[in-house]
Amino acid sequence: MMKLDLHTHSIASGHASTATITDIAKTAHANGLSLVGLSDHAPATLCAGKPSYFQSLSYAPRVRCGIPILYGVELNILDFDGRVDLDNTILEKLDYAILSMHTANIRPGSISQNTNAYIQAMKHAKVKIIGHCDDVSYPVDYKSILDAAMAHNIVFEINNISLSPEGYRGDTLANNTTILKLCAEKNYPVILGSDSHGTEHIGDFGYALDLIKRLNFPEHLILNTSVESMLNFLKINI
């Protein structure tokens, strides 16, 4: 059973969500999760939270509606040198950061350009998750990214929305299969992300779990199965 979901978005993300942080916590608790993480889009996303919003999260309650909550961000990679849209002084105060590429912020490049962008962006503070790196618009060298991720203690996300029929990142099945096979070979964990914008999909990993089952990916390498393992990975005490 999956115990946690760290890829969720509130109304502060500026699109496709009207949910408050309390709404997210309440739904996560009702859906049987033991931990939820808030990862709103960083400022380069249209109408997303300003830097001051992310600064204020360090003062937010650690428990809402009976469930512990972590406060993170989904960073936008802005160029092929790995620049992102929050500085390290703000990131240091958050629990974690997800690295992502979005076409509104960076044009798709070559395999080497996209790969370098991810690898360079891993050097920013609190980066712990590589978000939806399955997007067919951004071809990458997954082996090189995994090698760098292992060196920085960062994991790939298997994004449930990417694998769903409603997904908008192309046919991501082959890319997610490559990620999972490489991680299995290295005995290295992954994390599943609902990428829920609002409350509807919080804790929903159905498509990701279907693929994991087909590939016989080891359950002990899925960080969502243990709150203790997740917190140890993030080096957080709550």
Image (cartoon, grey):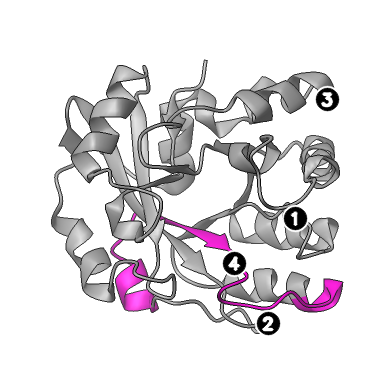
Separation of marks 1 and 4 at Cα, in angstroms? 20 Å
Q: Check disc 2 and give the amino acid type.
A: Phe
Q: Check disc 4 and give the amino acid type.
A: His
Q: In the image, 206: left or right of 56? A: right
Separation of marks 1 and 2 at Cα, in angstroms? 18 Å
The quadrant holding residue 94 is: bottom left
Q: Check disc 3 and give the amino acid type.
A: Leu
Tag shown at residue 102: 4
Tag shown at residue 215: 3
- The answer to whether 118 is drawn above or below residue 157 in the figure is below
Across and down, in percent, residue 238 comes to: 25, 38
**The magenta segment:** 87-113
Secondary structure under tag 3 reads: helix
Q: In the image, 204: left or right of 165? A: left
Q: Along the polypeptide, which appears first: circle 1 or circle 2?
A: 2
Secondary structure under tag 2 reads: loop
Residue drawn at (67%, 58%) of the image: 149
Q: Label 2 belongs to which residue?
A: 80
Residue drawn at (44%, 23%) of the image: 3
Q: Along the polypeptide, which appears first: circle 3 or circle 2?
A: 2
- Crowd around label 3: few <14 · some 14–19 · many ≥20 (10 Å): few
Q: Along the polypeptide, which appears first: circle 3 or circle 1?
A: 1
Which marked residue is nearer to the observer: mark 3 or mark 1?
A: 3
Across and down, in percent, residue 235 comes to: 40, 47
- The answer to whether 234 is drawn above or below residue 118 in the figure is above
Q: Are marks 4 and 2 in contact (CB under 8 Å)?
A: no
Q: Along the polypeptide, which appears first: circle 4 or circle 3?
A: 4
Separation of marks 3 and 1 at Cα, in angstroms? 19 Å
Q: Label 1 belongs to which residue?
A: 146
89 magenta-colored: yes
Q: Check disc 1 and give the amino acid type.
A: Leu
Q: Along the polypeptide, which appears first: circle 4 or circle 2?
A: 2
